[in-house]
Image (cartoon, coloured by chain):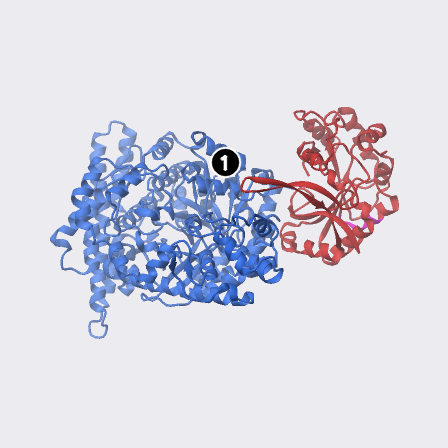
Chain colours: A red, B blue
Amino acid sequence: MNGIVFDIRRYAVHDGPGIRTTVFLKGCPLRCFWCHNPESQTPSIGFINKRRTLDGSEEWLATPVGREMTTDEVMKEIVRDRLYYEESKGGVTFSGGEPLMQHRFLLELLQLCHEEGIHTAVDTSGYANPEVFTRIAEATDLLLFDIKTIDEQCHYETTGQSNQIILNNLSSLDVPNMELIIRIPLIPGINDGINSLTDTIQFLKTIRQPVRRVDFLPFHRLGQHKYEALGLSPSPKLPDPHSIANTPEALALFSAAGFRVKEGG
Amino acid sequence: MITTRVNKLRSQSLNAINTISAERALLVTRFHQSDEAREVSAPVRRGRCLMYLLNNKAICINPGELIVGERGPAPKATSTYPEVTLHSLDDLDVLHNRAKVSFKSDETVREAYRDFIIPFWQGKTHRDKMMANMTSEWRAAYDAGIFTEFQEQRAPGHTVLGKKMWNKGMLDILIDIEHSRFKLDFYNDPLAYEKQEELAGMELAAKALIRYSERHAEELEKLAQIENDEKRKEEIKHLAEICRRVPAHKPETLQEALQHYWFIHLGVITELNPWDSFNPGRLDQHLLPFYQQDMESGRLTKEEARELLHCFWIKFNNHPAPPKIGVTALESNTYTDFSLINLGGVKEDGSDAVNEMTYLLLEVIQEMRLLQPSSMVQVSKKNPDRVIHKTLDIIRTGFGQPSIFNTDAIVQELMRQGKTPEDARNGGASGCVESGAFGTEAYILTGYFNLTKILELTLHNGFDPRTEVQVGILTGDATQFTTFDQLMDAFGKQVHHFVDIKIRGNNVIEKLFAQNLPVPFLSLLIDDCIINGKDYNNGGARYNSSYIQGVGLGSLTDSLTSIKEHVYDRKTISMRGMIHALDNNFKDYEELRKELVFNTPKWGNDDDAADIHAVRIFNLFFNAVDGRPSPRGATYRINMLPTTCHIYFGQVTGATPDGRLSGIPLSEGISPVQGADHCGPTAVLKSAAKIDHIKTGGTLLNQKFTPSFFDDSESYSKLTALIRSYFRMDGHHIQFNVINADTLRDAQKNPEKYRDLIVRVAGYSDYFNDLGEDLQDEIIRRTEHSGC
């Protein structure tokens, strides 16, 4: 089976336990204005202007983003670092974009990884058809589930979609032997306030699946130069470059509520 | 905790100016003018010479010191060795005035050189004799930059102390000499007389060191009488007692052990200037029993032990590498004298050797942050992760030390060469990354070998475009080769040709040292020189190896990949076109060059399209060198390390098919070409492990990380797993440079702000400020593997 992969990164050390290879699948239903990987949003192969320098001279080249790959081709890349996964108790992480947008491709990859004895993680926004979501959750060892905000209006305004599907998927999650880690991107002025954080805590207390840990990913502007390369302009809503998300308070609140917490992924 | 005393000694060492001292050269000259030097065998002459030196050189005792003795009359006053190589007045000027790694000399030094040293030694040095003995084809290859010669300006070295001397004094050694002498068989052994002479030289050398320590004791006793501070007076008296005991007797306490070693160290580096000074080897193993005894008897607290170790560390830093003459300074331009302290690893019986002294010494390394000594940690599969984590604690501070070695690979390498498991396990790595059986092996590095340059010659049918000399053999017009294998055949013939030339030269140089410059003192230390009655420089050691160090694996691999891809497979360009582009340094071939740089598989990305060429070159070089005999009974071996020679070799190598411009540094060690790896460290290590490290005596792999990789305990675990994985694949060595490029750029612009910035160069660390601009640029360029 074929899918569109936009990057494969080895020695990915912030996408789950141990040394991992992260496979980025292209396409995302959300349009988070802070997105660090805007080139991953469209499902088809696109182009990005990339700078290439040689001895001080520079040129800009239209470089394809994404390529069509078979599951076998992806697996060939994944198994390259098997030794490192074994030594570090790592594995492979499927991220995006939203990997569930290519769920058939993803499911086959998850199955192939398990045949190879390789630990898998799926990094998802949770925005997916409930049946698809359940099937993927049942097929992976670890789910990295992103929550932006519980506030539906705010979610709509910042990502372009309602969060109903996302929260329903999380609520109905009940898979034995699968680990769940919640990941919260902390955007200054959007979701790092005490109310927003408390709402998230309340919600997480209602879900059935045990939460192994909550990771906070403080916002940074590093990905923003990519918008220009794509011929887009960064969102005017972006926080001031000097504003810092209220990570210490978030860590303290969640910790007090009984969650294991971590800064960074 | 660093005491006030140590702080003072440390800053004295840091601030001491590197100078040339004429003392040793004058004493050696005077000795050679005397009757003592005439009409005696070489070992006896050298023994007497050492005796004369140690009897007459100034005794230097610095205020507050707990370990005493200096090679020169003061810290960083650096001896010269005119019997090996003679500095001209111009050389002294160059050393005095050069911006980096300078050595100051005053009018008295210049006068001594002008009036006494130069007139006596002109035309009579080892280097003069050596050069006169080299063939014209050796000289042509040397001038073209195909290889360098280690023994041109420094004596054979790469030698490390084993267990023996930590349990013996010079008086015990004298008994060993007597035993050996007793066994001489003048009826049946045609070499009995030579052995008798060698043993006589050894006896003189052992007695010379005892006398030298007594002179320290006498000086200390005098100092004690005039010392007003009561506490220091006691210390000095105690030091005098120690100098009366060691090195004549075996050491009994930690302080005695350190002082004992230090006298031995000074003996080795005063006798001659072996490449890689000298090295105490497995220091945590050797010092542990003394430390434990002192602690048990209540003689010493941990903090007092720490202070002693600090003082010991500072001693190394007071001793810069003796400066070279002429252009060869470019090959290895550093104050570092490569005394590489080994920690960790396995014991003789193969069990985990990490102990409390390992951890204490790691703290000492971190607290001292000195250029010298260098340090490394051996990691065996039997060692705990904790020792790696403690090592990463130091590495993360951007100090460039310690480097990390694979004990299990080293043991396999040494055993492949025929060492017993015990001798192999007592070994480790010295210098940059060189494997050796400590205390039982003479493993001599003979010179760097420019593999990339040989491809350039092959493409020109043996002709060197730079010196415009037909340096190589005629292997055919490369434009007529119809297959890639034809090119590889021609390349292989050229490699064999130059290895032959190099080995022929080595074998002559080896003889010159054996005949004219034996080292009876060093021979006392390395088994089985005394038993064999044979000098270290003449094959007296239990194991003897000679190494040739391959340089430019990455550049050569990428060049061959380019030719295979573009000339033979994709036919982007003809061989004639490629050679024309190279001859014109890619002028008017901009598009081709971009194809070569950006659109061609590269070494270091776990891509077999490139990596198979590295394996092929490695095997070719191995087969050309490994197993060949040398006159002293040694066997030739290869290792893959450049020190800083990849810069010099780059300067003499024209543009290469990987898109590298003429004069740019070659890749270093087995690392990828700077900036060519783009798949992260797991891919680099997998590529690197495709060559068979076990068939070498050491490989060097550099990985630069930004501090972000050392954030928390989880990243430590991941780095540990990275190291363990590489070692599971038999990787020999890995070193981490933790720094970000902006810091380095700032350091380049504002050197005054970064006087203590030490970076890992290639198998060793150096002050960033002391590096040439080209080397600084290279370190900045090396790929930064940033987090995902």
Location of residue B521 (image quadrant) = bottom left
Q: Which residues are magenta?
A: A135-141
The front one of B349 and B684 is: B684
Quadrant the N terminus of chain B occupies = top left
Query: Residue B665: horizontal and vertical position, in percent?
Result: 46, 48
Whole-percent x, y for residue A4 in the image: 76, 49
- Say above or below: B684 vs A247: below
Is B418 drawn above or below residue B106 in the view shown? below
In the figure, is residue B597 to the left or right of B310? Answer: right
Quadrant in the rendering for residue B771: top left
Given the image, on which type of amino acid does mark 1 rest? Leu
Question: Residue A234: x percent and y percent?
Answer: 72, 31
Secondary structure under tag 1 reads: helix
Is residue A254 rendered magenta in the image?
A: no
Is A136 rendered above or below residue B106?
below
Quarter occupied by the C terminus of chain B: top right
Q: Residues within 10 Å of mark 1 (few under 14, many from 20)?
A: many
From the image, tell me which residue sits under label 1.
B744
